Image (tube, rainbow, N blue to C red):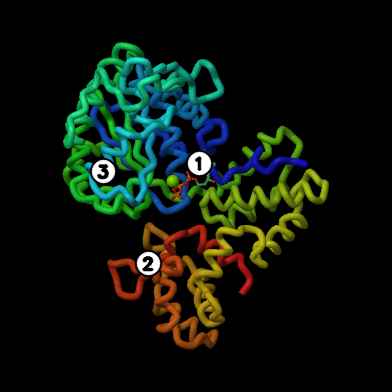
Amino acid sequence: MLDPETGFTSDVITDVNRFVGRADLIRSCMQALNSPTSLIAIYGKRGVGKSSLFRQIQQMALGDYTLAENAGLKHEIPLKTRKYLTVFYTCDSLINSGESLLSRLINDQDDEDGLLRLVPDDGKEIVEFTRAKEVSAGADLKVVNWGAKGIESTKYAKVVPDDTVQTFRNFLSSIVQHQVKKRMGRDGLLILLDEFDVLSDKKGLGSLIKSLSSKDVKFGICGIGQDLTDVIEDHASVERLLEQGAIHVRPMPNTEAIAVIDKAEELYSGDLTFDVDVKREIAEVSQGYPYFVQMIGKSCVTKASQKGVSVISQDIYREVLGDIRNGVAFPTLESAYQKAIGTSENRQMLLHLLAEQSEQTTLFHEDVGRIFIKHARKDAEDFDVDYLDQNLPRLLDRKFGPVLRRIPEGQGIYEFINPVFRLYVRLRAL
Ligand SMILES: Nc1ncnc2c1ncn2[C@@H]1O[C@H](COP(=O)(O)OP(=O)(O)OP(=O)(O)O)[C@@H](O)[C@H]1O
Ligand SMILES: [Mg+2]
């Protein structure tokens, strides 16, 4: 039995040796990291690979540039790179203000990624560790013992009652002074905030981040968006900080999608291979979304294991496609599909028409994936879908997904909120 997880994963990629492609993005990240003031902002569509890139930034921030070397950028790595201690935090929609964000950060007890772990404190035991397998890689700090007095005691950093911002500032300066400079001799502290777009009230976050950024403290934010304004509303206030830092993650070119499968073969060290044509087809249906490549790859491995074979042939791949078509391959996507269509065949038909709408109509636009309702109206007539106007609202309704969202820039233009869901619908049988 081969373990599908050996070669494929639907998780964020932290291990540099599993990260594929993205040379241009890696270059931009490297530049942003090595500029003393810049803010790093990563944005792009859902499932396109933002968090994985963000985790690689964390690795480079610690001084491990293996990724840049693997991507052929060795000659571009600065002779003296800026090195950081890092904090990594994933936001959620319950955070409703800048203040509640800071409050979360100063209370986060994660022992490898949290901010609190770095606040110097009596009794707390902090050790160096590396986030990569190589021992030579840059070290970060983690807590192995929070101390007898518990998590709250703060000797070196003063907590100011009822003033979260000041408390946060005190924490920062104590971390910079004691851990970043004195203990580890680093250039700064890097605070990475993933899923920044989900914060429910984004007002003033840009200026807050700007006021907290300095030559010793750098922020990185990452979130879903067409452009930076989706991630950071008052982006004007951080414009000057963004010279190097606004990084748009787009779908991968097909060659990189194929390279994800090559990488998997490498990870199986010869125990499993894919037909060249199968690789090409998987890349084709995945449209540059590595998540889809990983999911299909996993299904192929499982299927091959069941059959006791070590080559993913066309036959194996056809069986996997059959499972996807019948809704048994990807349970999460399937339940989203069922939720969207309910019991209406008309709605199901409409969903497929929209998912299959040719990309050609959108090619003039840099951002593919748009759906024009007027084309759908025409298709609906051709395919005899009744009541387009009655079936569309449910696809926009939160309760049932939502599957689509309206694009404000024009009448009757929509897009799939989750591009991977669109890819799924295309493979799913009606
Ligand atoms: N460079 C890469 N090489 C190989 N696989 C990748 C790469 N980037 C992302 N993936 C894979 O793609 C999937 C999505 O990655 P990731 O979670 O980083 O995307 P995301 O844009 O942060 O998604 P979300 O919008 O859901 O937060 C995961 O399965 C991950 O393993
Ligand atoms: Mg993510």
Q: Residues within 10 Å of mark 2 (few under 14, many from 20)?
A: some
Checking the image for residue 405, the label placed there is: 2
Q: Is residue 239 visible?
A: no
> Left or right: 283 with respect to 275?
left
The nearer-to-camera label among 2 and 3 is 3
The mark found on residue 12 in the picture is: 1
Sooner in the amino-acid sequence: mark 3 or mark 1 = 1
Tell me the element at label 3. Answer: helix
Which of label 3 and label 1 is nearer to you? Answer: 3
Q: Is residue 170 visible?
A: yes
Q: What residue do we see at 42% from left, 32% from top?
A: 110
Q: Amino acid at mark 3?
A: Ser
How many numbered callouts? Answer: 3
Give the image location of residue 67, x and y in percent.
49, 29
Answer yes or no: do the residues labelled 2 and 3 have beta carbons within 8 Å?
Answer: no
Q: Residue at x 28, y 30 (%)?
A: 218
Q: Position of residue 252 (x, y in %)?
A: 49, 48
Q: Is residue 280 above or below residue 126?
A: below
Instruction: List the residue tagged with mark 3.
Output: 100
- Circle 1 crowding by C-alpha within 10 Å: few under 14, some 14–19, many from 20: some
Mark 1 CB in 8 Å range of ligand 1?
yes
Disc nearer the start of the sequence (2/3): 3
Residue type beneath disc 1: Val
Residue furthest to the front: 149
